[in-house]
């Protein structure tokens, strides 16, 4: 049996290679249980309220003699809520569901980017196979045995689940924007991301990233004098955490 990957390596906006920890069977199962209870409660709630309104009294009568309106207004929406919960929310929430968000995981492509609607629909269609024979037997077995904790749907769609990378600290972002006025909002976020990782970077990486920022906001490499580079590198270093 292969051990799970420590993380999916991708390149961030700053050019730094970022490792996104792959979510294992435990985190995925916990998120699924949260979502399962949520969709069950929503489906049952719709059925009860719609049935009471349809019958005009506190009754959940489900006689087969009901006209098609009963199935169209009471039964079918409840089933749709239950079975379409995952695909609809994953598309709307960009690879997340309430359960995944509460656990801090999301669906990404093998390249680390957000999956398209087609990929999300494919991975959810394959839930029919992953759920066999009972209690997601196929899916759980595959997640334990595969290197990236993948179920059948992930293999078909080219996706996997990773833990969310924390966003840049808002206070640090605001500080970078105020103290390095030449940067726009996007540049300030890049600076904030860079400063958060500063202590883990070797000097060569610091120089490379500082030069990249300078070229982006102060002109091409040919336009930058050695004095300009030294001045702005020193300015970034003063912002860096100790």
Image (spheres, grey):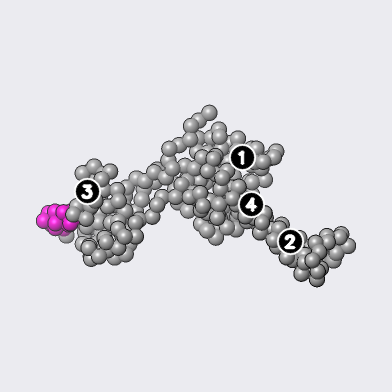
Of circles 2 and 1, which is in front?
A: 2
Quarter location, residue 177: bottom left
| Any part of residue 109 in sight | no
Residue named by callout 3: 242
Location of residue 74 in the rendering, given as x and y in whole percent from the top left corner: 76, 63
Q: In the displayed structure, does residue 141 sit left or right of residue 166? A: right
Q: Is residue 20 above or below residue 85?
A: above
- As for residue 123 lying within the magenta part, the answer is no
Residue named by callout 2: 47
Q: Earlier in the sequence, mark 2 or mark 4?
A: 4
> Could you tell me which residue is drawn at 36 percent across and 50 percent down?
12
Question: Is there CB contact under 8 Å for labels 2 and 3?
Answer: no
Q: Earlier in the sequence, mark 2 or mark 1?
A: 2
Residue named by callout 4: 37
* Crowd class of label 3 (few under 14; some 14 to 19; many from 20; radius 10 Å): few
In the image, 131 versus 126, the foreground residue is 131
Q: Tell me which secondary structure the magenta stretch mostly adopts.
A: helix
Q: Earlier in the sequence, mark 4 or mark 3?
A: 4
Location of residue 37 in the rendering, given as x and y in whole percent from the top left corner: 63, 52
């Amino acid at each position: 049996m292969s051990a799970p990957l420590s993380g999916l390596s991708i390149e961030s906006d700053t050019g730094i290679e970022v490792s996104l920890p792959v979510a294992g069977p435990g985190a995925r199962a916990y998120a699924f249980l949260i979502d399962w209870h949520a969709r069950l409660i929503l489906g049952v709630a719709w059925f009860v309220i719609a049935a009471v309104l349809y019958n005009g009294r506190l009754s959940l009568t489900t006689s087969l003699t009901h006209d098609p309106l009963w199935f169209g207004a009471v039964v079918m929406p409840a089933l749709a809520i239950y079975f379409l919960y995952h695909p609809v929310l994953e598309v709307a929430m960009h690879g997340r569901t309430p359960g995944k968000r509460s656990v801090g995981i999301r669906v990404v492509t093998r390249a680390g980017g957000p999956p398209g609607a087609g990929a999300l629909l494919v991975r959810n269609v394959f839930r029919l196979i992953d759920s066999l024979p009972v209690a997601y037997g196929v899916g759980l077995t595959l997640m334990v045995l595969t290197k990236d904790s993948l179920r059948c749907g992930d293999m078909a769609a080219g996706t996997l689940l990773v833990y969310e990378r924390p966003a840049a600290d808002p206070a640090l972002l605001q500080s970078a924007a105020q103290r390095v006025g030449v940067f726009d909002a996007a540049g300030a976020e890049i600076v904030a991301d860079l400063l958060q990782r500063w202590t883990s970077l070797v000097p060569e990486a610091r120089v490379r990233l500082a030069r990249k920022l300078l070229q982006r906001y102060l002109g091409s490499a040919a336009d930058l004098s050695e004095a300009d580079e030294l001045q702005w590198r020193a300015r970034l270093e003063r912002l860096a955490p100790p």
